[in-house]
């Protein structure tokens, strides 16, 4: 006879690392989109402040990726925020990489 599957409906809590990862990665993507929009509106003639905010977005993306990986190490926790933070962090890093490459080509 086949074994019966047992389902567990225990609510798992989010780890603090995974929540921090999701917040930082989402913030980095938002900073990227806002700076692209501002640069588009000002037709590329923005000051050095946009570079400083961009660097902050890059640091946020790498920190979100790091905390996302740390969130996977927690036992008996929900991994939704870790997955979200890791995916958004990777997307943000790719976006920032392309922005930096375009800036280097147009120097």
Image: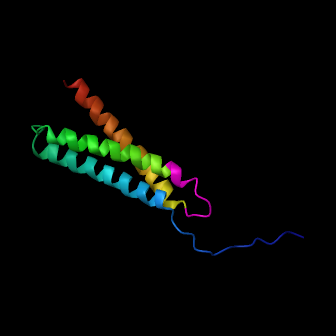
Task: Please state the horizontal and vertical placement of residue 94, each as a whole percent of the image.
Answer: 38, 39
- Left or right, 107 with reference to 99: left
- Left or right, 40 with reference to 27: left
Tell me what residue is drawn at x 21 percent, y 41 percent: 52
Query: Taking 98 as reference, is 78 above or below it?
Result: below
Quarter in which the C terminus is drawn: top left
Quarter in which the N terminus is drawn: bottom right
**Most common SS among magenta residues:** loop
Q: Is residue 71 magenta?
A: yes
Task: Please state the horizontal and vertical placement of residue 104, each as a whole percent of the image.
Answer: 25, 26
Q: Which image quarter: residue 10?
A: bottom right
Q: Which image quarter: residue 27?
A: bottom left
User: Closest to the observer: 21 or 35?
Assistant: 21
Q: Is residue 58 magenta?
A: no
- Left or right, 74 with reference to 102: right
Task: Please state the horizontal and vertical placement of residue 49, each as a whole percent of the image.
Answer: 15, 41
Query: Taking 104 as reference, is 95 above or below it?
Result: below
Tell me what residue is drawn at x 46 percent, y 46 percent: 66
The magenta span reads 69-78
Query: Taking 104 as reference, is 92 above or below it?
Result: below
Tell me what residue is drawn at x 34 percent, y 43 percent: 59
């Amino acid at each position: 006879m086949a074994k019966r599957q047992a389902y567990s409906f225990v609510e798992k809590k989010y780890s603090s690392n995974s929540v921090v990862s999701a917040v930082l990665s989402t913030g980095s993507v938002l900073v990227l989109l806002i700076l692209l929009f501002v640069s588009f509106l000002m037709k590329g003639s923005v000051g050095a402040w946009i570079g400083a905010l961009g660097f902050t977005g890059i640091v946020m993306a790498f920190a979100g990726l790091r905390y996302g990986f740390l969130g996977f190490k927690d036992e008996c926790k929900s991994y939704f925020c870790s997955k979200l933070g890791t995916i958004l962090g990777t997307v943000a890093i790719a976006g920032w990489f392309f922005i930096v490459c375009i800036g280097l080509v147009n120097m």
